[in-house]
Image: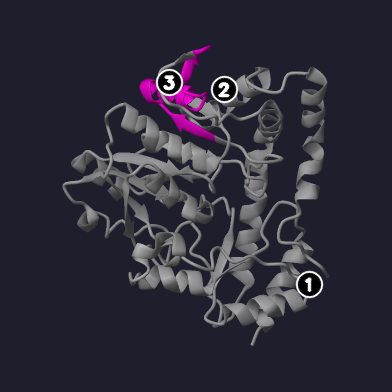
Amino acid sequence: MTIKYLDLHTINRPYEHAADEVLRSGWYLRGEATHRFEQHYAEYIGTKHCIGVANGLDALTLILRAYKEMGKLKDGDEVIVPANTYIATILAITENWLTPVLVEPDINTLQIDDTLIEQAITPRTRALMIVHLYGCCAYTDRIGEICRRHNLLLIEDNAQAHGCLYDGFHSSPQRTGSLGDAAGHSFYPGKNLGAFGDAGAVTTDDDELAAAIRSIANYGSSRKYVFDYQGRNSRIDELQAAILDAKLPHLDAANQRRKELAALYINKVNNPQIVMPHCQRDHVCHIFPVLSARRDALQQYLLDNGVETVIHYPIPPHKQSCYAGWNHLSLPITERIHREELSIPCNQAMTNEEADYIVDLLNSFA
């Protein structure tokens, strides 16, 4: 048996008609498809605004840039961020001349450890950026309380958690992307809600922030040939918006299938050399990460038996050469995750037979 990590051809085939409709329309940017998707996605997430942008990195970068234009952030301000994340989260901070402050994850959830956040706060701290990594909600009631008490902006990196819910003890369920002051979303093709190329969005309830982001992303212009900001070109195109709008009504069903497969893995894999993830009930399983001290041997074993896997991610941000000033830092939990993590196939294109085959392989790994 040969099992791809992610079979995008099978997943995307039902939505090819949306691309054809855009091509026939003759309108490719800032049209009705974009307007519809922004409206529908804002309603789905539960926010007043959705602004389509070029990609997920731009979404986060534009949030921070808009807050600087609004006077809520300035050069050198500190932004607390999980050490265990994809580097784009941190790139958005440093691109805006802000200072990332890295906080270790909880080894059980692999998300930012909310018991360590408060000790990282200094007089220069102005924001907390949480990352719903792997499709798991990183938000906790404690995080919300910390942000309120210290008057911190709460920004969500929701690139990997489309459709994820937070069901708190003191509130009704809310989707990630609506829990903080603003959220950045990526629709990279491999995401749970994936485009046919790069695309992203910002969601927020803040009218002023939404207007600033929409303007900055359009060369700094709110009216044609009138420029309020030194902006950039970061706009979602009609093709991607139409495809995403066609996929959106099916997102919850696709996520449910991912959850079923994750439950199958968790219930059936029993191997002391493999640590299974601590999945929350509303984890949307963008990535199904297992940990193993023999990660590289496990990956080769699965490949030899026809199963593709991916490592998310082999080198943590603080050990990358682009952040050489951090290379001396010791963040042992983050480093263990990046040393041991292996992502196994878990998506709606898979069959139970394929999942059972992977379970048998994992249980047989010695």
- How far is disc 1 from disc 2 in space, using C-alphas? 42 Å
Residue 167 visible from this viewpoint: no
Magenta segment, which residues?
A: 201-225
Residue 55 visible from this viewpoint: yes
The amino acid type, in three-letter code, at marker 1 is Gly
Callout in the foreground (3, 2): 3
Instruction: Give the crowd class for mark 1: few <14, some 14-19, many >=20 residues within 10 Å.
Output: some
The stretch drawn in magenta includes residue 159: no
* Mark 2 residue element: helix
User: Could you say which is closer to the camera, residue 64 or residue 14?
Assistant: 64
| Residue 173 appears left or right of 302 | left
In the picture of the structure, the residue carrying the numbered disc 2 is: 39
| Residue 93 appears left or right of 298 | left
| Residue 66 appears left or right of 311 | left
Quadrant for residue 178, please give it. Answer: top left
In the picture of the structure, the residue carrying the numbered disc 1 is: 306
- How far is disc 1 from disc 3 in space, using C-alphas? 49 Å
The colour scheme of the drawn protein is one colour
Callout in the foreground (1, 3): 3
Q: Are marks 1 and 2 in contact (CB under 8 Å)?
A: no
Please report the residue visible at 33 percent of the width from the left and 71 percent of the height from the top.
328
In the picture of the structure, the residue carrying the numbered disc 3 is: 211
**Mark earlier in primary sequence (3, 2):** 2
User: Could you say which is closer to the camera, residue 167 or residue 61?
Assistant: 61
